[in-house]
Image (tube, rainbow, N blue to C red):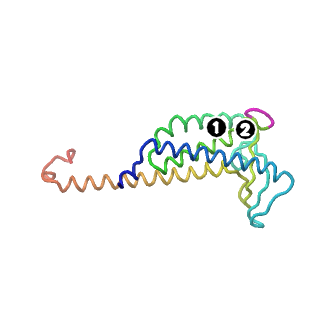
Amino acid sequence: MASHRAHPRPSATRAVMIAVAVLGFVLDRATKLWALHALSVYDRQIIPGWLSLHLVYNSGAAFSLGTSFTVGLSCLSIVALVFVLVWVFPRARGWLASVAAGLIAAGIAGNLLDRLLREPGPMRGTVVDFIAVRYFAVFNIADVCITSAAILFIWWAVRSDQTVEHAVRRANAVGASSPGAEGAPEEDR
C-alpha cells in the first residue's frame, strides 16, 4: 500500500498535472480580469502599509526586469512552455513533481497569454500585475504559480537526493553484511 502512494500510476500524476495547470491558469485569468475591472480607479488596502491590490501593467519579467526585451521574453516563454509540456510533463514522477509541473505550466501560460493578447500588440503585450507587497514587488497569480513550482521542484530534488543517498547506504550495508562480501574484490561489492 505504501509503495502505491510513493509511486502513483502515471495516469494519476498526469491527471494531477493537468488539473493543477488548468486550475492555476483559470485562477490567474479570472483574477487578472477582476483586477482590470475592480482596480482600474482605486487601490485596495488588504494589510495597511504592507499588502495592497494595485493595478500595474508590466512589460518586463519578474520585478519589472527586461522591460525593453518584451518580444524576447515572449519567445523565451513559448520555448519554456513547450519544454515543460514536452519534456517535464512526461518525466514528472510522484505527486510533488506533478503539482510543480502543473504550476509552472499554469504560470508560464498565464503570463504568456497577456504578452500575446494585450496592448500594444502580439508578443509585446503587458502583463497584468496587481498584488503589491511593500518593499518587494507587484505580481500576479501566474507569478505565484511559477515561484511555488520552483520551491516545490527544489524540495522534490532535495528529497530525491536524500532518498537516493539512503538507498545507496542501505544497499552498501546489505552488501557488506552478505556472506562472502568480505572476500570479494572491491569493485564487486
Query: In which image quadrant can residue 166 be found?
Result: bottom left
Q: Are marks 2 and 1 in contact (CB under 8 Å)?
A: yes
Q: Residue furthest right?
A: 41
Mark 1 residue type: Ser
- Quadrant in which residue 178 is drawn: bottom left
Work out how far the residue at label 2 is from the one at label 1, CA to CA, in angstroms: 9 Å
Closer to the camera in the image, 117 or 20 = 20
Q: What SS does tag 1 mark?
A: helix
- In the depicted structure, whether residue 124 falls above or below residue 163: above
* Residue, far bottom: 48
Q: Residue 120: x percent and y percent?
A: 81, 36
Image location (x, y in percent) of residue 69: 72, 37
State the SS at label 2. Answer: helix
Residue 115, which numbered label? 2
Q: Residues within 10 Å of mark 1 (few under 14, many from 20)?
A: some
Residue lying at 16% horizontally and 51% vertically, measured from the top left = 181
Highlighted magenta segment, given as a residue range? 119-123
Residue 23 horizontal/vertical position (percent): 61, 47
Magenta-colored stretch includes residue 65: no
- The residue pinned by badge 1 equals 77
On screen, residue 116 above or below 146: above
| First in residue order: circle 2 vs circle 1 | 1
Question: Above or below — where is 41 with respect to 85?
Answer: below
Query: How far across and down, in percent of the image, does residue 72 sit?
Result: 69, 35
Q: Nearer the viewer, residue 154 or 2?
A: 2
Q: Which mark is residue 175?
A: none
